């Protein structure tokens, strides 16, 4: 059995850990609020950007555009958005396992890791990693999305990748996060069933698409980055709350054990004193 000194030392250690976890919980909660505000603010821009693509007609110019053309798939690229740090529960594991299950080994898959944890996961499993983007998970900037989307476009147009997927975690609520694997290239043409009004493109549809498609890809990647960042902070906040509760339970159990041992030690001392007094009485 551990001594009272050992138990006391462990209680102090767990209390220190609990304070750290509580501070991390508060930081994550503050970051979550900022991420949710950023996500809400980005939605109008993202929705309008998508309408630029979904609202075009099904003309030959559209269907012959390289971003819409279907190819025989030989090489598949996956953009995997994870965190750079741990302590966020199963956030990274749920996404990386979903991507691994989605990968078809016959397509010569390639990984673009946005986040250190995804890079480590697929590197350990011998997957081909083309590029790694660190420090984009917590503080998301639009130029990060532009860099990643530009690289994906170059992969696709050069023929190095025949299709491109983006894997991210979709934010539903603070407690619900859904890992998703979304195909982003080639683009799927889904014209609106009942367009509100006829669209005119100047100078022509082809020139418009050359400008609009990169912007649409930027919006898709930016959305995935923001969604993942929000989920990461929510997952870390929940994980830290659970850690604080567990630490409190451990402290409660250790304190009870310490008090029992202390009481037993006091009782033993009293018994020894009484026994010694009785012995002195007998010797008189």
Image: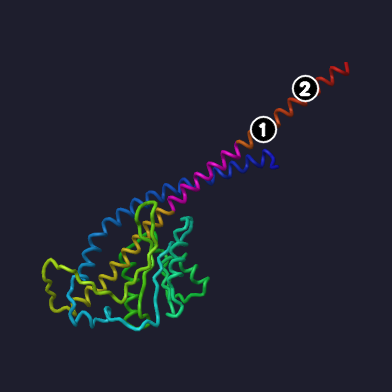
As drawn, is 54 to the left or to the right of 106? left
**Percent from the top left, x then y, of residue 168?**
38, 64
Number of residues whose C-alpha sits closer than 10 Å to that of mark 1, classed few (under 14), some (14–19) or many (20 or more): some
**Percent from the top left, x then y, of residue 94?**
45, 62
Between the C-alphas of marks 1 and 2, the distance is 18 Å
Number of residues whose C-alpha sits closer than 10 Å to that of mark 2, classed few (under 14), some (14–19) or many (20 or more): few
For the point 26% across and 56% down, which residue is it?
A: 41
As drawn, is 182 to the left or to the right of 49? right
Q: Which residues are magenta?
A: 236-255
Q: Which corner quadrant of the image does residue 279 belong to? A: top right
In depth, the one of 75 and 222 nearer the eye is: 75
Q: Main secondary structure of the magenta part?
A: helix
Badge number at residue 84: none
Residue beneath disc 2: 274
Q: Earlier in the sequence, mark 1 or mark 2?
A: 1
In the rendered image, the quadrant that contains the N terminus is top right
In depth, the one of 33 and 122 nearer the eye is: 122
When the figure is inspected, residue 54 is found, relative to residue 272, above or below; the finding is below
For the point 48% across and 70% down, which residue is it?
A: 122
Residue beneath disc 1: 262
Q: Is residue 242 magenta?
A: yes
Q: Secondary structure at mark 1?
A: helix
Q: Is residue 222 magenta?
A: no
**Percent from the top left, x then y, of residue 7?**
64, 41
When the figure is inspected, residue 244 is found, relative to residue 44, above or below; the finding is above
């Amino acid at each position: 059995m551990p001594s009272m000194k050992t138990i006391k030392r462990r209680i102090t250690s767990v209390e220190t850990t609990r304070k750290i976890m509580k501070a991390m919980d508060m930081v994550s909660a503050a970051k979550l609020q900022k991420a949710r505000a950023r996500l809400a603010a980005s939605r109008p821009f993202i929705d309008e950007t998508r309408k630029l693509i979904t609202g075009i007609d099904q003309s030959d110019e559209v269907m012959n555009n390289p971003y819409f053309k279907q190819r025989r798939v030989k090489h598949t690229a996956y953009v995997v958005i994870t965190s750079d740090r741990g302590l966020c529960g199963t956030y990274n594991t749920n996404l990386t396992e979903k991507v691994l299950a989605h990968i078809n080994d016959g397509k010569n898959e390639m990984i673009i890791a946005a986040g250190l944890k995804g890079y480590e996961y697929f590197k350990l499993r011998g997957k081909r990693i083309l590029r790694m983007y660190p420090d984009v998970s917590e503080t998301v900037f639009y130029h990060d999305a532009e860099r990643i989307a530009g690289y994906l476009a170059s992969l696709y147009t050069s023929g190095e990748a025949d299709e491109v997927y983006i894997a991210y975690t979709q934010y539903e609520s603070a407690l619900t996060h859904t890992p998703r694997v979304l195909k982003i290239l080639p683009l799927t043409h889904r014209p609106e069933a009942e367009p509100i009004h006829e669209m005119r493109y100047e100078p022509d549809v082809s020139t418009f698409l050359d400008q609009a498609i990169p912007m649409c890809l930027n919006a898709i990647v930016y959305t995935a980055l923001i969604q993942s960042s929000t989920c990461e902070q929510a997952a870390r906040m929940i994980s830290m709350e659970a850690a604080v509760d567990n630490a409190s339970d451990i402290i409660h159990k250790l304190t009870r054990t310490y008090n029992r041992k202390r009481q037993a030690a006091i009782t033993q001392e009293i018994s020894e004193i009484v026994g010694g007094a009785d012995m002195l009485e007998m010797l008189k």
